[in-house]
Image (cartoon, rainbow, N blue to C red):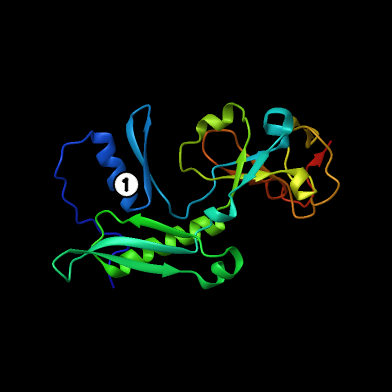
Amino acid sequence: LEPRYTCNIIFYNKDQAYNVLKDIAAIFKGIVFWNTEGFSFFVDRPKEQLMNFSNSSVKDGVFNYTETARNMRYTSVEVTYNDRYDSYKTKIEYIEDTDGIRKYGLNPFKINAAGCTSRSEAKRVGRYVISTSIFEVDTVNFVGGLEAAYLQPGDLFTVSDEIRNVARTFGRILEVDANASTIKIDGEFKDGLDSGIFVHIPSGNYAVSDLNALTGADGGFTGT
């Protein structure tokens, strides 16, 4: 019965504008970054992926994965906030994940919820910290091509790693022959094409086309 995020904050001291913007953005789980036009914002919310990367579209065809340490998967959080119903006194809200404690042990974390004056919002802040630390544990590093320049901080992309997936599901189109209704791809697909072939258009905007639908018949295009 209240907004997901609220901001009730007073700045007593002067600070750089960038630092102030970062503090405000952190309230709604956002980040601030500089692009060619000025400051831009990203907020952590559901959105569509913009691009797909596979072994054929990254340097040396290699994805490097790292995982967070177990003690970085927080299972209890103390959130400091100012209670608007009690003269804005500083209080602490405690949140814990019993299932996480059984699995990872008691890993405490403390956070100051800037601008937060609601106990229920403080609970949401704590749950957010626990959820992200437990479920967002993998990091992938790779060197992409020029198409990666379309991405900005906060954009979503998918990774199709044939080594990790034990299957090849993505590749590059090397040549299109419209007269023969054939396409030439950069590798062989063992299986998995019964549901159709989808093409990502490199136009800067994410788009997917089903070749079977374009031809009006199943299997209308032949891969070579």
Residue visible at 18% across and 67% down in the picture: 84
Residue 46 appears in view: yes
Residue 27 vs 4, above or below: the answer is above
Few, some or many C-alpha atoms within 10 Å of disc 1 (few <14, some 14-19, many ≥20)? some
Relative to residue 2, is residue 46 depicted above or below? above
Along the line of sight, which residue is nearer the eye, 116 or 49?
116
State which quarter of the image contains the C terminus.
top right
Position of residue 139 measured from the top left corner of the image (x, y, whole percent):
59, 44
Residue 172, can we see it?
Answer: no
Q: Which residue is mark 1?
A: 25
Tell me: residue 148, above or below residue 154.
above
Position of 90 with respect to 109 (left or right) is left
Q: How many marks do you count on the picture? A: 1
The amino acid at mark 1 is Ala
Q: Nearer the viewer, residue 197 or 140?
A: 140
Question: On the picture, is 215 further left or further right than 44?
Answer: right
Position of residue 161 measured from the top left corner of the image (x, y, whole percent): 72, 43
Quarter that holds the N terminus: bottom left
Q: Residue furthest right?
A: 190
Give me the residue at 41% from left, 68% from top: 95
Q: Position of residue 133 (x, y in %)?
A: 51, 56
Q: Residue 8: percent from the left, percent from the top? A: 19, 56
Instruction: Residue at 37% x, 26% y: name it.
Output: 36
Q: Is residue 65 left or right of residue 167?
A: left
Foreground: 141 or 184?
A: 141
- Quadrant of residue 180 within the rendered picture: top right
Tell me which residue sits at (50%, 59%) in the image.
Answer: 74
The residue tagged with tag 1: helix, strand or loop?
A: helix
